[in-house]
Amino acid sequence: MSAASVSATLSTSRRDSARRWVQVASHVDSRFGGIATSLPQLCASTAGNHEFTIAAFCEPGERKPATYTDRCNVIQLPRGRTRWSFDKALQNRLREVIRHADGLHIHGIWEEHCAVAASMAHVLDTPYLISAHGMLEDWAFRDKGLKKRVYSALVEAKNLRRAVCLRALTTAEVADYRRLGLRNPVAVIPNGVAEPPASTPAAFLDKFPALAGKRRALYLGRFHHKKGLDSLCLAWSRLCGRHRDAHLVLAGDNTNAEGDRILGMVRELGLDGSVTFTGMLRGDLKWSALAAASVFVLPSLSEGFSMAVLEALAAGVPPIITRACNFPEVEEQSCGWVIDPGDQQLEAALRTALSAPASALQEMAARGRDMVRARYSWESVGVQMGQVYNWILGGSVPDCVEVY
């Protein structure tokens, strides 16, 4: 679609009184994790008279999730810093989208989508806010640390300073912004989670019949080195011999270098008989896998605010997570286990979970469901985000915003 076509489409589709927001993200396909999964829900739930265009910088073949509604116009753009530096037609296409917007919300940093969109918004005098989604967390900042420090000094710190507001998923993320010297107002608004559909293990066990009769520990997410999957494999190798009925399920798109590495590690440790790689699970099959799980495991070294943890809690699966997942409520509400990263505490938590009577796990599951319903409904998140958008466009400061 040309810049002229974009302009015509945006101009004719707008309701007279609507405030138009452009959501800018690095992917649209849910296999890329949390932002792509949560963004359509955020748009659908945001309160007030707002319309949304999602400008997603995508790899070839990305699929738009069915969760996008007619309230979200999705424009898929190519990735590549070099291309965005020199392709004037491509730059003009995004510039036209931003020119018709009342405001911009940029999700994620360190990539070209943030640099390009923030720069264009600044030139066009369009207010924008940035959600870092945990990408300034200490571990994340140290990963490829020299490169990020240089890039921050040259590009990213300027983008962040110019933002009218920063959105934090947790209070810990507020500290991440302040540690970088940022004095912008910060809105603390978590991700939400929808009420899961009624599900049973049947569909999942029909697809993986060898797992019937097992106590299943489920990892559900991206295959990325920050997720702690090597620690999970090491922990599992030491306990699976004593828990013959236990099985580890690794669910996610493992067709990348990290997936190959973990597959090789499983084979090297001799775990082929007690570990199953399912590939990406979507829709009803994902919820069936959660219904089949005895415990959910996310041993991450760094997380912003995991949608997978929220979905596991909402589905009634007690989680084993690290403190890096930023869910202290799991420990406070006694609905799971919160541990330090590494294989030793993970092994101990898995042993406890796999030895626990079903009644104890059911009680934890009930507490987790109640906590999620009370604190993380999309309705509550949508009200807060709508208030922030209204404030940025001239309204009053909402309670969720911390002014430095």
Image: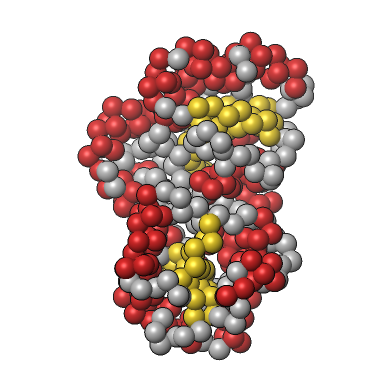
Q: Which residue is drawn at 71% across and 18% down?
A: 9
Q: In which quarter of the image is residue 43?
A: top right
Locate residue 289: give its quadrant.
Answer: bottom right
> How many marks can you see?
0
Note whether 379 is above or below 337 in the view shown.
Answer: above
For the point 58% across and 29% down, the residue is 76
Residue 269 image point, x, y percent: 33, 71
Colour scheme employed for the rendering of this structure: secondary structure
Q: In this view, does 226 lie above or below 246?
A: above
Q: Name which residue lies at 67% across and 69% down.
A: 206
User: x%, y% of residue 35?
Assistant: 53, 45
Residue 75 located left or right of residue 224 = right
Vertical placement of residue 373 versus 178, above or below: below
Where is residue 252 drawn, in percent x and y?
A: 51, 56
Position of residue 54 in the picture relative to residue 10 (left or right): left
Residue at image point 53% right, 75% down: 216
Which residue ends up furthest to the left in the rendered image?
A: 146
Question: Residue 131 or 276: which is nearer the viewer?
Answer: 276
Work out whether residue 111 or residue 153 is closer to the camera in this orientation and state it: 111
Residue 209 drawn above or below residue 166? below
Q: Can residue 152 be seen in this view?
A: yes
- The x and y percentages for residue 368 are 59, 71
Is residue 396 something one can see in this rendering?
no
> Which image quarter is the C terminus in?
top left
Please identify the quarter of the rendering in which residue 83 is found: top left
157 on left or right of 167: left
